[in-house]
Image (cartoon, grey):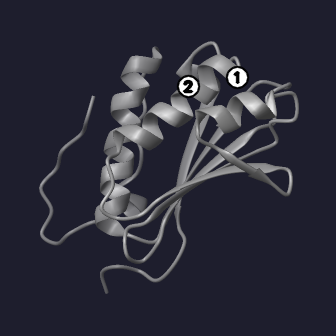
Amino acid sequence: MVALKLAGEPMDLVDDGLWHNSKRFDEMSTELAGDLGRMIIDHDCLLIVEGTGVEDSFRIAFEVDSVGNLSVQLSGANEVDTSALIELGWTEGDGAYRAQWDDPLSISGPVWLVVNALVEHLHVPSPTELRFSIERSGPVAYV
């Protein structure tokens, strides 16, 4: 579900807000792709995805820089098989896993990588077990 509203001026996703209603990972993939698309248009955004369970201490940070490059970092995934994540496309270093895409990019790649890690390696049962937040990571796009 997406909420559309008329606005006199462009509004960044950070100011507009997130609405995640997915109960299945195929639905979450669509919502996440929409978030990333908006972030690439807006630039300088940081989307955080965290597990809400007591044992879920992982954090996934999606950051889009000032030119539209996307980097993703997975931290706190201590019980995950490192070789399996590297085989998926993550790189490992300093206790975290990272992936990066230069602009222009296909959003399906990062969405697939993260959803696969959530389901197959972090064993998150449902997107309802996740908390999403967004913040600015650089200068305000519209003044």
Q: Amino acid at mark 1?
A: His
Residue 62 % position (x, y)? 54, 53
* SS category of the residue bearing label 2: helix
* SS category of the residue bearing label 1: helix
Residue 85 % position (x, y)? 69, 33
Q: Quadrant of the C terminus?
A: bottom left
Say whether marks 2 and 1 touch (CB < 8 Å): yes
Residue 60 % position (x, y)? 64, 45
Q: Residue at x 33, y 67 (%)?
A: 42
Few, some or many residues within 10 Å of mark 1 (<14, 14–19, 20+): some
What label sits on residue 99 in the rendered view?
A: none
Q: Is residue 130 left or right of residue 42?
A: right
Q: Quadrant of residue 77?
A: top right
Position above or below: 126 against 18: above
Q: Is residue 11 visible?
A: yes
Report the label total.
Answer: 2
Q: Quadrant of the N terminus?
A: top left
Q: Residue at x 38, y 70 (%)?
A: 43
Q: Residue at x 77, y 32 (%)?
A: 83
What label sits on residue 116 in the rendered view?
A: 2
Position above or below: 1 against 105: above
Q: Is residue 12 visible?
A: no
